[in-house]
Image (cartoon, rainbow, N blue to C red):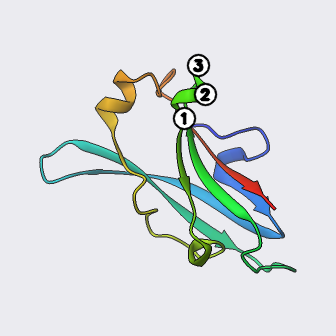
Amino acid sequence: HVYPVRCPRGNASIKGRGVKICLLVYKDASERNVISFNLTFLGESQNCGPDMDMMLVLVHPTNASLNKCRPLKIDEIFKSQSQVDGFAFFADALCRDGFVADDMLLVCLETAE
């Protein structure tokens, strides 16, 4: 998986806090591979209140209208998530739908104040 240039290896800085985006791969009850993500917020923030909108985005490499977005709830912002609920995908479906390019996924956090 790859991350945008401003977010090398899943590390980014949002409002003074470091954020790490990690890929989780596991098998569900039917033995299908599932891909999900966790967010780890690190460090101190001068303004750590939830005064912004934040969204986790799985980016489709050729068709932005297919992007999969998961807005973070106010009580999730700046709190580490062992797994972001409601943002898990079957690996075979991601490959079939064109989200995997050269064995890579593109994931980013979008913010708006």
Q: Position of residue 30 (x, y in %)?
A: 12, 47
Gap between marks 2 and 3, in whole Å?
Answer: 7 Å
Q: Quadrant of the C terminus?
A: bottom right
Residues tagged 2 and 1 counted as in contact (Cβ below 8 A):
yes
* Residue lying at 77% horizontally and 38% vertically, measured from the top left: 5
Quarter residue 60 falls in: top right
Residues tagged 3 and 1 counted as in contact (Cβ below 8 A):
no
Q: Mark 2 points at which residue?
A: 64
Gap between marks 3 and 1, in whole Å?
Answer: 10 Å
Q: Which three-letter amino acid code belongs to the residue tagged 2? A: Ala
For marks 3 and 1 on the same chain, the one whose residue lies earlier in the sequence:
3
* Residue lying at 70% horizontally and 62% vertically, measured from the top left: 53
Q: Which three-letter amino acid code belongs to the residue tagged 3? A: Thr
**The residue tagged with tag 1: helix, strand or loop?**
loop
Bin the neighbour count of mark 3 within 10 Å (Cα to Cα): few under 14, some 14-19, many 20 and up.
few
* Residue lying at 66% horizontally and 74% vertically, measured from the top left: 78
* Residue lying at 59% horizontally and 68% vertically, measured from the top left: 40
Quarter residue 44 falls in: bottom right
Gap between marks 2 and 1, in whole Å?
Answer: 5 Å
**The residue tagged with tag 3: helix, strand or loop?**
loop
Quarter residue 39 falls in: bottom right
Q: Which three-letter amino acid code belongs to the residue tagged 1? A: Asn
Bin the neighbour count of mark 1 within 10 Å (Cα to Cα): few under 14, some 14-19, many 20 and up.
some
Q: Position of residue 31 (x, y in %)?
A: 15, 45
From the viewer's perspective, tell me whether residue 107 is left or right of residue 31.
right
Q: Position of residue 9 (x, y in %)?
A: 65, 47
Residue 62: assigned label: 3
Residue 67: assigned label: 1
Q: Position of residue 22 (x, y in %)?
A: 53, 55
Residue 44: assigned label: none
